Amino acid sequence: SEAAMLRRSNSGTSLGSKTSKFSTSSLTRSLSGASLGFGTGKSLKFFDPGLAGAKKANSDEDVLQEASGDWHYLVVDVSGIRPRDDAAYDDTKRRNAPRLKEGTLVEIDRRRKSGWTTWLNLKSGDGWLFDVSPKKDKKVRLVEVEAVSGGWQYEAGVYKAPLLTLPSLWQAKMVSRSNPSTYIAPSEVFSVNQRVRPVQMKGSFLRLADGRGWVMDFMDGQQLLHRVHARADATDPHNTSASSRDPVLLAPQKLGPSETGDWDYVVVDPNGMALRSGPEY
């Protein structure tokens, strides 16, 4: 629904507040709680009270309603999760398959919805996983994330940004309550080659290009890192010398070439939006 879309898009909460004990089973109570798993006792998902638990999604109807695409999920259960041979909870676990540890990023190419559980087929062909347990505890095992590779510059603020070995919520919880032994020093500028952002949260895991590990841009409700943007001037047309932090106000620029295609957009401003006669404000 539109309300659900707005809640998902406008969640103002961050990775890593610490107001209560961590529990992945507690992540099933609201749509977009303050943090991903550690510290809030709130959930990543909203469940329609009319939904019933379903331990399998392999009927003909389930197969017909299956969605195909390309998605990324992050394992958030500290116990990890083992793939299954079929989209069914009972007696399908692959005993010889390695357990996927918390902090593992997986690619998914098929999804089936059954009750409050979404079954996820691994693109690698190694079997099926599920995001939320179909049992009564509704324990969250995986969360959907946006995973993007590229090249970006970030600068640390006045706080230490702890280094993690994986995009791990559990590691982040532990280091956020102690003085980290390895961290990004305040004011340090560094390169990032991958960003992993849970779709229902504010904040991302960032992988350092120099191989030191991962870091979070938000933790315990504080922004630890700022994106650095190159800014051109008359003597530096290739954007090599100057930089600026988020947010960046760019000078008006000439419009590039037009594109032709078919796209869908959703108006999210509660005041609506008036049409303009041309592409200018």
Image (cartoon, rainbow, N blue to C red):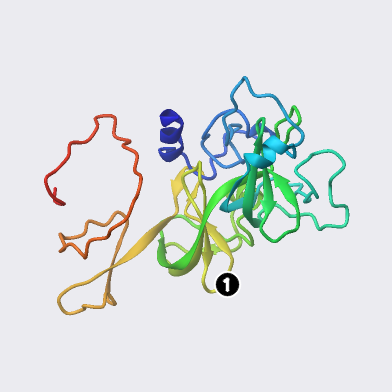
Q: Position of residue 129 (x, y in %)?
A: 72, 47
Q: Is residue 263 left or right of residue 16?
A: left
Q: Position of residue 226 (x, y in %)?
A: 39, 57
User: Residue pushed farthest left?
Assistant: 277
User: Residue pushed farthest top?
Assistant: 50
Q: Is residue 39 above or below residue 1?
A: below
**In this orientation, which residue lies closer to the viewer: 91 or 179?**
91
Identity of the residue drawn at 50% across and 43% down:
201
**In this orientation, which residue lies closer to the viewer: 278 or 105?**
278
User: Secondary structure beneath disc 1?
Assistant: loop
**In this orientation, which residue lies closer to the viewer: 76 or 266?**
266
| Res 240 quadrant in image | bottom left
| Res 140 quadrant in image | top right
Residue 24 appears in the rendering = no
Q: Which residue is mark 1?
A: 211
Q: Position of residue 70 (x, y in %)?
A: 56, 55
**In this orientation, which residue lies closer to the viewer: 82 or 65?**
65
Identity of the residue drawn at 24% across and 32% down:
272
Q: Quadrant of the N terminus?
A: top left
Q: Position of residue 279 (x, y in %)?
A: 16, 52
Q: Is residue 226 above or below residue 142?
A: below
Identity of the residue drawn at 51% across and 41% down:
200
Residue 214 appears in the rendering = yes
Q: Residues within 10 Å of mark 1 (few under 14, many from 20)?
A: few
Q: Amino acid at mark 1?
A: Gly
What is the number of callouts on the image? Answer: 1
